[in-house]
Amino acid sequence: MNILVLTPLVPYPPHDGDKLRLYHFLRYLKSRGHKIDLFCLTRVEEDLAHLGKLEPLCRQATALPIHDLDFFFNLLGGALIGQSLNVSAYFSPDLREILKGYWETPDGRSINVVLAHRLRMAPAAFEGNPGVPVVMELTDSLAGYSGQLRNIPNARFSRRMAAKWDHWFLQREEVEWSDKAARTVVISRTDAQVLLENGVPAGKVVVIPNGVDPQKPAGSKKDRIYPSDKAVSFVGNMGYAPNEDGALWFLKRVWPKVKREVPDAVFAAVGGSPRRRLARYHNGRDLLVTGWVPFVEPYVSQACLTLAPLRVASGMQNKVALSLAMGVPVVATPQAVGWLPAKDRSGVIVGGTEGELAAQVVKVLRSPRRYQTEAKKGRRFILKNYRWKASGALLEKVLKEAARKGGKA
């Protein structure tokens, strides 16, 4: 097939959840002989330099920046016309004009199916489209995410107000764009349930989880990262609002309780783009805020346990899957493990309140071998059920069916 892929990010380097997912999908589709035309938007201008890394996977690859001023006026315009902030923020006149011309080119006329990655690319996928079927790859239900965020205690007032505004529009938009699409893809059954409850027909929704890469962790046990063997690691993009919120909540409300019980414990927030409100906790001794690192695997493998202290979560949490795939136990909030079947959570210890989460961390730090044994069971489950090849094959099937039926569900 010839596939047009539209995305609001440059899917390289494949570290963050969205980048990781799309990058592996592109790799799989390329390996199957499909031709891909990739059009990206990005708010991170540094990512434009990574476009060359994607060219071997694509027939053509284009990336356009959305500057802060554009972003501001997009939000203002979206508010005036009654559109969600998530969708309006990524309006690009430049992309609109490029796609208008693209559909008239030989490459554009050859397209069999469009893959719109994330809801914010839906307008670009349909506007000017000469009738090519579209598969909406929502990944997460943003309506479900905003519904959680608007009620989180102690979250920033501006963030909760934005979530309240967006929630109503997103509920409507996810249904409307799904109605137009041949299929709508989400990452977990939890996200699928949100769509179904809001009115998307069951026959439209397909669940395709992420995979994990079972490669050996980079680095060596001899190259010690942590000053103590009682290390607690939280990996992810620390500039991403739910991760930042989770890290700050844990540090303020939970970590002091842990330190009283285990004085030599070390906490590490590992991953790119931490803002000052989080970075200021770094002291180089028992509190580490690393920023971007080339490989997160050593920080996972050398930790006694990893954390997923998310108060707002949607979709599949790659940080949990990675930790289990490496046989490292996870202490998590209920929100972070909703994608995992309850009967298949070996190696995952859940704490719903500040006190419960602290108690669970302390238990693992005091008896690491016991919980590592449970994590090995979790590893077997993850490696059996979450593989990129299987997820890519599911997406390929959805795209082929959409192309064959011409967009009819």
Image: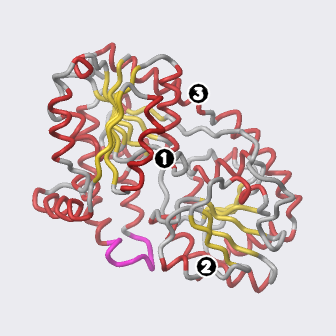
Q: Residue at x 48, y 41 (%)?
A: 187
> Considering depth in this image, is 362 or 76 the residue closer to the camera?
76
State which tag comes first along the sequence, 3 or 2: 2
User: Mark 2 = which residue?
Assistant: 251
Amino acid type, residue under disc 1 in the picture: Thr
User: Mark 1 = which residue?
Assistant: 190
Image quadrant of residue 77? Answer: bottom left
User: What is the number of the mark on residue 318?
Assistant: none
Is disc 1 surrounded by few (<14), some (14 to 19) or many (20+) residues within 10 Å?
A: some
Magenta segment boundaries in residue numbering: 151-160
Q: In the displayed image of the protein, which residue is found farthest to the left?
A: 80
Is disc 3 surrounded by few (<14), some (14 to 19) or many (20+) residues within 10 Å?
A: some
Q: Is residue 384 left or right of residue 6?
A: right
Q: How is the image coloured?
A: secondary structure
Q: Residue at x 75, y 56 (%)?
A: 329
Q: Secondary structure at mark 2?
A: helix
Quadrant containing the C terminus is top left
Q: Is residue 18 left or right of residue 82?
A: right
Q: Residue at x 46, y 29 (%)?
A: 57
User: What is the number of the mark on residue 390?
Assistant: 3
Above or below, 101 against 191 in this view is above
Q: Secondary structure at mark 1?
A: helix
Relative image position of residue 393 (x, y in whole percent): 53, 23
Above or below, 81 against 40 in this view is below
